[in-house]
Amino acid sequence: QVQLVESGGGLVQAGESLRLSCAAPGNIFRFSDMAWYRQPPEKQRELVARITVRGNTNYADYADFVKGRFTISRDNAKNTVFLQMNSLKPEDTAVYYCNLRGLKLDAWGQGTLVTVSS
């Protein structure tokens, strides 16, 4: 079973920033596509951002509701994917989950809570 370790959630005010991190096993990470999902209270889980690697190029795509505010990135040397969240809004309040897909694996982190107060 693949273990993903998330960190960085917390309570912030609207307009502030947070950075989430997710570490994965190195022998899997560099071959895998990584993504962040979130699940707001009483709502379904939704894709926030995804980063894929093809050759030496990273490709990132975002949900419309975070474009221009969130940035996904990966550090293959540290086997870590990041989600930089700027200009946070109360509607960004959710449990954020890291997802790894690769080598026939589909693994999830335990989730980290982000709460944005108005």
Image: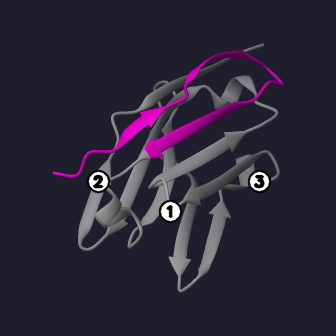
Note whether residue 45 is visible.
Answer: no
Locate residue 91, reporting x and y percent: 68, 28
Nearer the observer, disc 1 or disc 3? 1
Give neighbour class at mark 1: few <14, some 14-19, many 20+ (Cα, 10 Å).
few
Q: Can you identify the residue that label 3 sits on? A: 67
N-terminal of the two: label 2 or label 3? 3
Q: Is residue 103 above or below residue 24?
A: below
Q: Can you identify the residue that label 2 sits on? A: 107
Task: Locate residue 96 relative to residue 117 in the image: left or right.
Answer: left
Which mark is drawn over residue 41? none
Residue sitting at x 58%, y 47%:
82
| Front in this rendered view, residue 90 or 83 | 83
The boundaries of the magenta stretch are 1-22
Note whether residue 40 is visible.
Answer: yes
Q: Can you identify the residue that label 1 sits on? A: 76
Locate residue 47, reporting x and y percent: 53, 52
Locate residue 68, reporting x and y percent: 82, 51
How far apart are labels 2 and 3 at the CA level? 25 Å
Locate residue 62, reporting x and y percent: 66, 59
In magenta segment, residue 103: no
Give neighbour class at mark 3: few <14, some 14-19, many 20+ (Cα, 10 Å).
few
Nearer the observer, disc 2 or disc 3? 2
| Front in this rendered view, residue 57 or 101 | 57
How far apart are labels 1 and 3 at the CA level? 24 Å
Tell me the quadrant of the picture where the C terminus can be found.
top right
| Front in this rendered view, residue 105 or 23 | 23
Give neighbour class at mark 2: few <14, some 14-19, many 20+ (Cα, 10 Å).
some
Looking at numbered disc 3 in the image, what kind of residue is underneath it?
Answer: Lys
Element on which disc 3 rests: loop
N-terminal of the two: label 1 or label 3? 3
